[in-house]
Image (tube, rainbow, N blue to C red):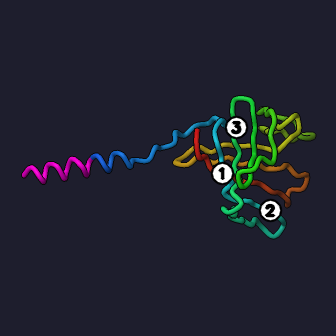
Amino acid sequence: MNYLKCFIAIALLTLSACKKEKLQSSGSIVGQWRLNAHYETTIAGTRRTAANQSDLTIIKFTDTQYIQSQKGQVIESGNYQLAKNYNFYDDYHADALLVNNVVKGVYAIKRGNQDTLSISMPFFAVDAGASDEYVRISN
């Protein structure tokens, strides 16, 4: 009987030690995001291309800093701003991500089991567009 109790105790300790930390869903951009897919829209439709995980692209946002890395190497960094209702051009306003005072694109965060961050460039044509989808990997 003592062996059974010991086995159950060890099994419970092992399972609780292996418990994966769950990310908290958040509307905040602060955290780390991994590129998941790229979307291109043309008159023919939208094409989704999954990100190449060997080219691992990560964006990290702190309260003020933006750091984009690929394969562990920083490729862009600087201060960022989130501009609500930014005026891209006449009659087109959207939430914008600016890095070093340059527009990076329209951004949107979708909360869920795995938060996603979409960064897309606004185009003048209705039938053309491109966006990148990132998934949150840490808060």
| Residue at horizontal 84 percent and vertical 35 percent from the top | 86
- Residue 118 in the figure: left or right of residue 104: left
Image check: 134 left or right of 86? Answer: left
Q: Which residue is mark 1?
A: 34
> What residue sits 71% from the left and 55% below the top?
71
Sequence order check, earlier mark of 3 and 2: 2
Residue at image x 83%, y 65%? 42
Asked if the residue under mark 1 is in contact with the one under mark 2, i.e. CB atoms within 8 Å, the reply is: no
Q: Earlier in the sequence, mark 1 or mark 3?
A: 1
Mark 3 or 2, closer to the camera: 3
- Magenta stretch bounds: 1-12
Establish if 127 lies above or below 25: below
Residue bearing the label numbered 3: 61
The front one of 106 and 19 is 19
Q: Is residue 72 left or right of residue 127?
A: left
Mark 3–mark 2 distance (CA, rounded to whole Å) = 27 Å
Residue 91: x and y in percent read 89, 40
Q: Quadrant for residue 76, please give it.
A: top right
**Circle number at residue 18:** none
| Principal secondary structure, stretch drawn in magenta | helix
User: Depth check: 51 or 119 in front?
Assistant: 51
Residue type at tag 1: Arg
Q: Secondary structure at mark 3?
A: strand
Find residue 116 and report its horizontal and vertical position in percent: 63, 48
Q: Specify the amino acid type for callout 2.
A: Thr
Q: Is residue 9 magenta?
A: yes
Q: Which residue is mark 2?
A: 41
Could you say which quadrant of the image residue 110 lies in?
Answer: top right
